[in-house]
Image (tube, rainbow, N blue to C red):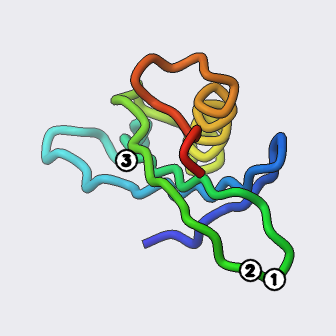
Amino acid sequence: MSTPLSDHYKGFEIKVQALRRAKERDEPDDSPRHFDIVVTIARSAHGESGRSVMFGVPEQEPFESPIDATRTGIDYAHQIIDNKIEGQSVEDL
């Protein structure tokens, strides 16, 4: 399991984990990898643990690196916070 990367955006704390999937048998060793991306969003609070919500990022094309997968997770969290993803919201935080 990877260590979550943190970011802050518009008063929310974002944590992203990019979990690398196992390679398929027929995949070449140097092929791009698939990642499952999990985003956790919480209100930013100094020294306090607030309520958080976890979101799974929809299936993506293979990524060249975990950094690319993590950037996709951060972008997705920003879209949720900006109310651009239908059915996903941080309104109750």
Residue 67 point in image, percent of width and height? 65, 48
For the point 43% across and 37% down, the residue is: 57
Q: CA distance from mark 1 to mark 3?
A: 30 Å
Return the mark for residue 47. Answer: 1
Q: Amino acid at mark 3?
A: Asp
Return the mark for residue 89. Answer: none
The image quadrant where one finds the N terminus is bottom left
Say above or below: 11 vs 78: below
Q: Of circles 1 and 3, which is in front?
A: 1
- Describe residue 32's horizontal placement relative to residue 83 as left or right: left
For the point 62% across and 39% down, the residue is: 68
Q: CA distance from mark 3 to mark 2?
A: 28 Å
- Describe residue 73's horizontal placement relative to residue 43 as left or right: left
Residue 76 point in image, percent of width and height? 58, 32
- Upstream in sequence: badge 1 or badge 3: 3
* Residue of label 3: 36
Considering the numbered disc 2 on the image, is that residue within a helix, a strand or a loop? loop
CB atoms at circles 1 and 2 under 8 Å apart? yes
| Residue that lies at the very extreme toward the front in this rendered image | 92
Of residues 55 and 68, the one nearer the viewer is: 55
For the point 39% across and 43% down, the residue is: 56
Q: Amino acid at mark 1?
A: Gly
Residue 61 point in image, percent of width and height? 41, 25
Of residues 3 and 25, the one nearer the viewer is: 3
State the image quarter where residue 42 is shown: bottom right
Q: Of circles 3 and 2, which is in front?
A: 2
Say above or below: 46 vs 10: below
- Upstream in sequence: badge 3 or badge 2: 3
Considering the numbered disc 1 on the image, is that residue within a helix, a strand or a loop? loop
* Residue of label 2: 48
